[in-house]
Image (spheres, helix red, strand yellow):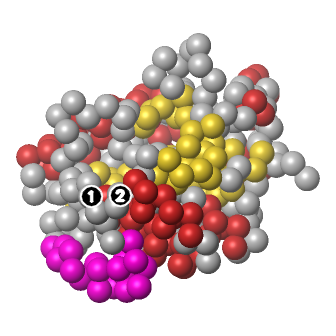
Amino acid sequence: MKKLTIGSTTYDDFDGVFFSYQSLRLNNLDILDELDLLIIDNNPDSAEGQATKDFCDKAFIRYIPETSRKSTALRNKVFENAQAPYTLCMDPHVMFEPSTIKYLLAFYEANSDTKDLYQGPMLMDCIRGHDPMTHMDPIWRGHMWGTWAIDKRGISANLPPFVIPMQGLGSFSCKTSEWLGFNEKFIGFGGEEGYIHEKYRKEGRNCWCLPFYRWLHRFGRPRGVPYPLKLEHRIHNYVVGFQEVGLDLDPLIKHFTKESPDVDIKEIINDPDAFRNKLELTNGLSNPKDVPALPKFDISELIKRDNIVVELPK
């Protein structure tokens, strides 16, 4: 029985998919039959896309090509295609500590009816010698809403969960049926941090940091970013998202008027649909057999050994 879907959307990132998912598989050989691994490929016809499909076929990872559009909202499809009751969505260039997935399974077993959104601290490249980034503060800087921050309540894996304002979306998780979804009008990439967290709060739900849910993100792209990365797309997404959840647009207008005076913010705000059409975005922006069953792994013993907290504060 599948207990957790782990999925990513990708665009010409074969190396990321290969190493992230092989790391997942190697660290969880004893519970692979409980994991539903999934790749949504946004550029399946490229050489990288074809290599990604070939790898997924060999590694028992479900592979779904998606060419209808380019959008950060495509991550909704990870949840739409999930075959497990809980889903972890991650960038295709993220890695976890060896026991993280087992901890998360134990957490969901202890909190099976949860409707909240869960994330964890992001480790720095040095891994040791620097506290992990437990959340983001809702501050505008450098064309983005959200600055990395550290809360001492989350710097060790065995500390209890706590509520956060927002966090980078390199990895996030919730009960599959309780995913509230990114706005389907989002285009290109960016603008979703903070928005999705406010969407959960508007529904009376919480956004949590699980200190054991630690992840490492590859930021470097020495060959460049292969997909369109336009500031206008991000601003459009902020406007659409803020309007959806009722966030104040004034700080957004002030920030981008100062940082990007060449972009007509008022035009986007007055008619996002017309602005989206003006950009003239075009398209272009069978399940494998289960792996052999392995001896049953006792997650409760691991949780007890590592002193991991899987109960939410009352």
Q: In x, y percent, where is residue 45?
A: 10, 57
Q: Give the residue displayed 75% in from the left and 50% down from the top.
A: 163
Callout 2, which amino acid? Ser
Which of disc 1 and disc 2 is earlier in sequence? 1
* Residue 5 in view, yes or no: no
| Residue bounds of the magenta highlight | 265-282
Q: CA distance from mark 2 to mark 1?
A: 12 Å
> Where 313 falls versus 43 (above or below)?
above
**Would you say the magenta stretch is mainly helix, strand or loop?**
helix
> Where 129 falls versus 35 (above or below)?
above
Q: Which residue position is annotated with label 2?
A: 260
Q: Quadrant of the N terminus?
A: bottom right
* Residue 238 in view, yes or no: yes
In this image, 22 relative to 175: left or right? left
Q: Give the residue displayed 60% in from the left and 45% down from the top.
A: 136
Q: Give the residue displayed 67% in from the left and 33% down from the top.
A: 150
Callout 1, which amino acid? Lys
In this image, 96 relative to 279: left or right? right
Q: In x, y percent, where is residue 314?
A: 91, 53
How many neighbours does mark 2 have within 10 angstroms: few (below 14), some (14-19), or many (20 or more)?
Answer: few
